[in-house]
Amino acid sequence: MSAPPRKRVPWVAAAALACLGLIPPGASRAATATASDRLDELMQLLSARRHGRVTFTEVQHLAILDRPLESSGELLYDAPDRLEKRTLRPVEETLVLAHGVLTATRGRHSHSVELAAHPEAAPLVESIRATLAGDRAALERVFSVALDGDLAHWTLTLAPRDSAAAHAVREVRITGARAGIATVEILQADGDRSVLTLGPEASS
């Protein structure tokens, strides 16, 4: 009988944005301004979208399992701080973040937690919310952020500043094109990882 999977990293590993191009010592002020401008442009594009509903697939690679865990469903967003993840396969489950409270529902059972009481999870949740909201200040408060590429094809690398979060998650990598997020990869400190791939807009 195989051991049960470890507690998964909060689903909020799926997409948060903001970047602060890391400029090496000696870089010109012009280069610094360019990196800051690119960040502002990306944040403006992201913040312009007030609502969203996309399909997703998620693959989790866990060292204790012989094969990856796969799931799929829909991800919904309403600015500025409501996120909903509806997992439809293999098991129906709903996760809702609203006003700093994360609620998980499976069948008739529901459980809510205040993110403020779980500092190791809060940064990951904020990464998604702040990314979708184009909230640069919030991202920079909780992450060391780096942006690579241009608006046509960008990658954000987010490293948690909080020590408790850093013990669980090494970094979050988000890729996208302009205002669209393509993937969110979570690299855990123990070597496990998960990849959330966002698909096209889901039909109403």
Image: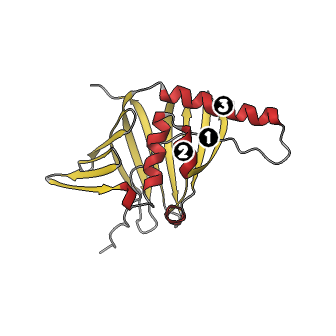
The residue wearing badge 2 is 139
| The disc label shown at residue 38, or none | 3
Answer above or below: position of 3 versus 198.
below
Tag 2: residue type? Leu
C-alpha gap between disc 1 and disc 3:
9 Å
Q: Pointers 3 and 2 in contact (CB under 8 A)?
A: no
Compare residues 3 and 15 and report the one nearer the observer. 15
Residue in view at x 40 percent, y 47 percent: 58
Disc 1 to disc 2: CB gap under 8 Å: yes
Residue 94, percent from left and from top = 26, 46
| Disc nearer the start of the sequence (1/2) | 1
Q: Which quarter shows the N terminus? A: bottom left
In the image, taking residue 25 as reference, residue 20 lies left or right, namely left
Foreground label between 1 and 2: 2
- Per the image, the residue denoted by label 1 is 19
- Write the residue at 74% across / 32% down: 33
Question: In the image, 189: left or right of 22?
Answer: left
Residue type at numbered disc 3: Arg
Q: Residues within 10 Å of mark 3 (few under 14, many from 20)?
A: many
- Circles 1 and 3, Cβ within 8 Å, touching? The answer is yes
Q: What element does badge 2 sit on?
A: helix
Q: CA distance from mark 1 to mark 2?
A: 8 Å
